[in-house]
Amino acid sequence: MSMPDNARILSLIERLGNLVRAEGRASGAGLEPVHRDILGYLSICNRYSDTPAGVTEYLGATKGTTSQSIGVLERKGYIKKSPDKEDGRVVHLSLTPKGRKLSYAGAVPDGFAGALSDLNPGESETLARLLSDLLAGVQRRTGGRTFGVCRTCRFFRENSLPGSHQCGLTLEPLSDGDSIKICREHETAA
Amino acid sequence: MSMPDNARILSLIERLGNLVRAEGRASGAGLEPVHRDILGYLSICNRYSDTPAGVTEYLGATKGTTSQSIGVLERKGYIKKSPDKEDGRVVHLSLTPKGRKLSYAGAVPDGFAGALSDLNPGESETLARLLSDLLAGVQRRTGGRTFGVCRTCRFFRENSLPGSHQCGLTLEPLSDGDSIKICREHETAA
DNA sequence: AGATAATAGTATCGATTCGATACTATTTTA
DNA sequence: TAAAATAGTATCGAATCGATACTATTATCT
């Protein structure tokens, strides 16, 4: 008689997602949820992914919509655009100091922080893992990118020098800092 | 070095929520996510909760916004308004046949169905439980309603006749069908 | 080489959300 | 009976969002 687990999970995710959006909207200084999403993404993505197309894939929106949101953030001084040196079509996005501050500020809203602290540590970990698995599964199925961490990608290569790595796709060198960012070209290592 | 579990969970919920919204938008015939939310809510709420105020609390929006969305659904013929018999301020909302069909159709999008089926049954159950707990915790803290199932409410009373119950708040009789719907006045039984 | 296709991004349109504010009507409370 | 609370609507401006059309650049194919 009760709802099947799948539909229930979906409904819960939708409601919790709405709450996160609503809480964020209430507390963020005039910033829409999508703006916080974009700033957050730009703060953790690597140099292959900091483009309007990368943001578009990450958010699952259309590129027209994303272009508008990026325009708003640029006009308000949170991000800056700079042309790619090799591909004349590509634009890179970077956070201004003002934008960087906000991308950190978007911490955990009070209501959630409290509710999460009610879970015991094992449960938090389980929840995080199950949600990750679910997200990865959805993305695999819908052809979406996984946006995994560089270091876990099948193209990631260790170099002989400590702290020096290489991307097998672009063949470019990668620093330790690069290796912990997320990438739109990420494919999970087998 | 890695993200704390709490921030990670929040980010996962936000991303999954966005995906649900996006998938729903793509597949639903011109219906916005909030419209599906409203239709879904009306299909499972009881007669004390099928009002604009009930929808407002459930969605966490403002009443002005909700009033507009309800207006759209009414104009498009998915729901119908009828005045309350006792309180002249109150309006009840009901699904038209057209609306009822859509509230069922909004089932689980393909990508999610597949990804959820990858979890083994125990994991699904765990995930559903953890998300429920989280939602309840957030609502308790933010003063929001829990919208629990009538039968689990502290005001729910069994009658001597089988299949007949009573609401201790309104003192009205409740059928078996009533007892499995969600209510905005719900308070978890101790 | 040169035509064609694919890709990155922008511009514009209409419908809609959303919060804020103000407003009406009804009911409750003091 | 007057004041306050409640339910709901109306209106405004800013922004999202998808759809479509468009420009510019790069890749591909013949």
Image (cartoon, coloured by chain):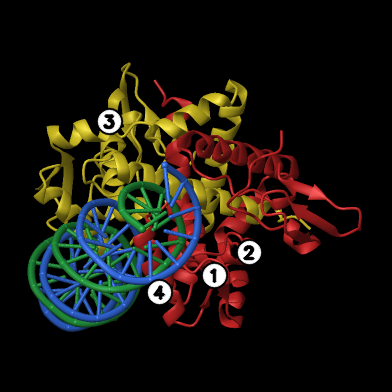
Chain colours: A yellow, B red, C blue, D green
Question: Which is closer to the viewer, label 3 or label 2?
Answer: 2
Please state the chain letter of the residue tagged with numbered disc 2 in the rendered image.
Answer: B
Which residue shows up at 44% across the image and 37% down it? Answer: B10
Percent coordinates x, y for residue A67 in the rendering: 21, 59
Question: Whole-Å distance between the Cαs marked 1 and 3?
Answer: 44 Å
Residue B23, given in percent of the width and then of the height, sits at 47, 63
Q: Give whichever of discs 1 and 4 has the lower sequence position.
A: 4
- Mark pair 1, 4: CA separation: 13 Å
Residue A187 shows in the view: no
Residues at discs 3 and 2 both on one chain: no
Labels 1 and 2 in the same subunit:
yes
Q: Which residue is mark 2?
A: B47
* C-alpha gap between disc 3 and disc 2: 44 Å
Mark number displayed over residue B92: 1
Residue indicated by mark 3 = A104
Q: Which residue carries the number 4 mark?
A: B71
Residue drawn at x 61%, y 41% is B132
* Label 2 crowd (10 A; few <14 / some 14-19 / many >=20): some
Q: Amino acid at mark 1?
A: His
Amino acid, disc 2: Arg
> Marks 3 and 4, Cα distance to the nearest angstrom?
38 Å
For residue B114, above or below residue B4 = below
